[in-house]
Amino acid sequence: MHPLFKSLAGAAVLAVMSASVQAEPLRIAILESLSGAQSSTGRPYVFATHYVLDALNQKGGFNGEKIIITEYDNGGSPTSASAKLKVAIADGARIVIQGSSSAVVGQVTDDIRAYNLANPGKEVLHLNVGADALELTGEKCHFYSFRFASSAPMRVGALVKVMKDEGTLGKRVYAINQNYSWGKDMEAAIKANAQRGGYEVVESVLHEVNRIQDFSPLVEKIKAANVDTVITGNWSNDLLLLMKAVGDAGLKARFGTAFLDQEGNISNAGDVVLGHYVVHTFNIELTDGTFPKDYKKVTGHLPVYVEPNAVNSMKMFVKALEKVNFNGGAIDTGKIALALEDVSLQTENGIQSFRKEDHQLLLPMVVSRVEKDVKYPVDGTDIGFRPVKIVPAAEIVYPVQASCKMQRP
């Protein structure tokens, strides 16, 4: 054989051998609100995901290859998210990470369930890292969906307990929430906790989502109601603009919130926000400083708002990956899901793990108060969130909903 042909034949054999031993990479889609009014919540999930998974890739990745992470902008719309999910799956995504907006997550998890039923053996795993609506672990629950977030009963239960114990809850409460699944869950939880909290819900308002540009008329209604406390589950632009109106009006009523630690709220409200409360999944004031310092080194900013819990979510996911070994072969998301069910994570808040019946994360909640002289002031101010109490998950978690009919493999 001519030397040239021998060389070409050898190269062809090497190419075939190389292709035969190449491992299957794990492809992950971050399907988030990366533009529009909800991007202030969507972007932090991207930072947190990359913080953990890029570190895993630096150690070699998973299944013999680097993990491939692709971002898809859903624009905060269920319709857009549904379309982008199809693109992500066509691109080979086996894991979908998403957290902002229960309405969007509800659409995505329904679409993933339908896809999985139609494509056995090629199932996509859905990691809900932020959406709290009860239906996501109720009628929308399924084996390939895990909720790393809390719920309205968990948040309101912890908030009411701590504020009552502190003597700051008062007797007259105003509820203001967004008019969709999450906001309705919050409204129901606020009313359900009234007897235990010893308060009367003077008025309850559900408003359009991301449509109101000026909350001052609603703030004037709150003023006129002469309430002690306002409890709200508002988030994203609806909370930012509500806090701006509160600051402009100098409203004296105390707020109990679910997402006051969202970046921009404190600077929007100013000193009037001192003494307000937030119930959140994590508070970096509780750490020894190592994690915040490293996160800032990697991302350029301190971990705030949803980022710490999203980091813990990804740490749990990595622990699940460590429990499975596909030897470079085909990735079985069912085995990853089974591994994730058995993962627990020790955090500064306490241990968190999954309830297998509905894949609700059992996580402690932290109730914090807005104060000065904290370790990590926010928004370029001298104000931050001082932890008041950690409430164990067992004290606040809701029962498995009868509407959850999970079919296990």
Image (cartoon, rainbow, N blue to C red):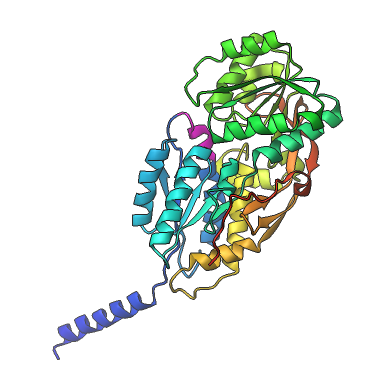
Q: Nearer the viewer, residue 248 or 401?
A: 401
Please indicate whether residue 110 sits to the left or right of residue 348 in the image. left
The stretch of residues the image draws in magenta is: 37-44
Which residue does the image show at 80% across and 34% down from the upper left? Answer: 161
- Vertical arrangement, residue 69 with respect to residue 168, above or below: below
Give the percent coordinates (x, y) of residue 187: 64, 29
Judged by its main secondary structure, the magenta piece is helix
Q: Nearer the viewer, residue 16 or 2?
A: 16
Residue 40 in the magenta stretch? The answer is yes
Give the percent coordinates (x, y) of residue 268: 60, 19
- Vertical arrangement, residue 9 with respect to residue 35, above or below: below
Q: Is residue 367 visible?
A: no
Give the percent coordinates (x, y) of residue 409: 53, 67
Please indicate whether residue 275 sits to the left or right of residue 135 in the image. right
Q: Is residue 395 visible?
A: yes
- Vertical arrangement, residue 18 with respect to residue 293, above or below: below
Which residue does the image show at 69% across and 39% down from the upper left? Answer: 153
Which residue does the image show at 58% across and 52% down from the upper left? Answer: 404
Quadrant into which the N terminus falls: bottom left
Give the percent coordinates (x, y) of residue 146: 57, 53
Please indicate whether residue 27 sits to the left or right of residue 396 in the image. left
Please indicate whether residue 236 sits to the left or right of residue 68 in the image. right
